[in-house]
Image (cartoon, rainbow, N blue to C red):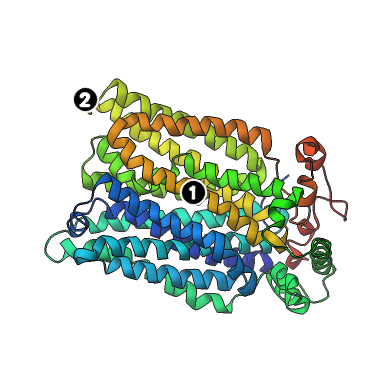
Amino acid sequence: MALSIPLSKGTIRLHALCIFFALGSFLWGYAIGILATVYVSPGFKKDLHPLSASRQGLITAIYYLGTWTSYVFLASPTSDRLGRRWAVWVGTAIACVGAAIMTAASGPGAFAMMIVGRIVSGVGTALISTSVPMYQSEISPAKHRGRFVVMNHIGLVAGLSAAFWVGYGMSFWEHGKGFNLSWRLSIAVQFIPAVILCAGLPFLPETPRWLIEKGRFEEAKRSLLWIRGAHEDNVEVLLELDQIKEAMEVHHSKGDPSWKVLFTNKDLFARMWRVALLQFMAQMCGSTAMKYYLPTNFIALGLGKELSLLASGIESSLKVGCTIMEMLLIDRLGRRKTLVLGSSIMTIALLINGALPQAYPHNRNKASDYACIVFIFFFTFGYSVGFGPNSWVYGSEIFPTHVRAKGLCISASAGSIGSIVVAQIWPVAFQTIGSKTYFIFMSINAASIILLLAFFPETKGKTLEEMDNLFKKNPDADFESAQRSTDIYGSKGAEEKVVYVGDK
């Protein structure tokens, strides 16, 4: 089946919306990536002296205390009460406050200001990281939903790439005023995309599913008609609206969607633990270490500071290309196959990075060091087609609308826990046992392959309302029948029918 998307008013609007919301993910990625370049800045090291491995690990990990707190207590109620787009706006504003605090860090209280700034930044980016993929998922057609939600991750890795290139550029301005200002300006650059995002969000439509959830059916109708580029009397859009409304009525008949229902309802719990495990594995696979300590890892392989930043910029740019490739593959191969493929590649890459420095210690074999660098790039490819985008695609599509924000937020909090663990372990472990640290995360990736094959059903091509068929009380026994399920229209999904009404 061809997966090319015909050009129409509706598809242009859908792409434009998903790309603009990906600007929020760009901000999220920049906030993560820029710290890796700041860590090797002489001015930063002086301002935060002494910067031991444990203090560096704390600065990294404390950010995820902020994201965890936001996921559990703030992100879901904000998204459910204000809507997806306003939740992104609030998150962006909070992230800017955190960035401002970090930019101003100086004097005896510099370390404390960095800690506070990182926590506040984490609170804000948690709102962004959950609300952006929810928005993209809720406005996208089932047949191509993976492609559009992957734009969230493209924004993230584009932000990472921009951060590394900014850091590389600033590394040449470390004399005179640049010694104290370069790392601060690097952090402050994120205000540019933040202002653009906050200025544009109020003018964009809210998702039809959230509007129906709030009983605003006419607004939902106008929103979906505009997004699909359809006329007011278009039958297929009206059928899509009715399907969403009927699915919500079924879920509402089961009672108030509190946090408790995610643990007490067997169908919802079957979804939640899977997404929570997926988010946890997505961080424990080693990605957090590669994001924050990549220049440091390259320096350990014998590269100079400027060259390590250059290599980090190239690596992060490769992430963008690989994620675009994943955008084209995810709705063809499916979620499970790309997840398993990515984990397999990362397992091999981490094995090589752990073994070669043990065989040739102290950078005495340049070929060995260069091979490790090459396999770090392979790790990037594996993560970009696997856990990176899929952990958010999978989580944003399997929950019903009335608990989607709660389910995604509590699941994402498991990812924050994984990030805290990795951020604290990596610098200390690398200082203590060196490249053997890679073996720890290699083992986690190998175990992930087994878990993915055993417990994660394919969601490719399913409408958001069809997901109920995939996660019954005994979902594992129903794997095959769930994969063959059809919706009330007797096709692969009503949403497939309404994707390109603008072409008619």
Q: Secondary structure at mark 2?
A: loop
Residue at horizontal 34%, vertical 67%? 189
**The C terminus appears in which quarter of the rendering?**
bottom right
Residue annotated with mark 1 = 417
Residue at 72% of width from left, 67% of height from top? 209
Please state which of residues 491 and 250 is positioned toward the viewer in this rendering: 250
Task: Specify the quadrant of the image occupied by residue 108.
Answer: bottom left
Element assignment for label 1: helix
Disc 2: CA contacts within 10 A as few (<14), some (14-19) or many (>=20): few
Marks 2 and 1: in contact by CB < 8 Å?
no
Of residues 36 and 69, the one drawn nearer to the viewer in this rendering:
69
Drawn side of residue 355 relative to residue 18, left or right: left
Which corner quadrant of the image does residue 244 belong to? bottom right
- Nearest to the observer: residue 23 or residue 268: 268
| Residue occupied by mark 2 | 364
Above or below, 78 against 365 in this view is below
Report the disc number at residue 16: none
- The quarter of the image holding the N terminus is top right
User: Would you call the spot at circle 1 few (<14 residues within 10 Å), some (14-19), or many (20 or more)?
Assistant: many
Kindly identify the residue that appears in the image at 83 percent across and 67 percent down: 242
Side of 55 relative to 263 (left or right): left
Q: Identify the amino acid type marked 2.
A: Arg
- Report how far apart the C-alphas of labels 1 and 2 lie in the structure: 37 Å
N-terminal of the pair, mark 1 or mark 2, is 2
Q: Is residue 270 left or right of residue 72?
A: right
Q: Is residue 480 visible?
A: yes
In the image, taking residue 267 as reference, residue 277 lies left or right, namely left
Task: Point out residue 231 in the picture as x, y percentages from the top left corner.
Answer: 78, 75
Residue 453 percent location from the top left of the image: 65, 33
x and y percent of residue 468 in the render? 78, 51
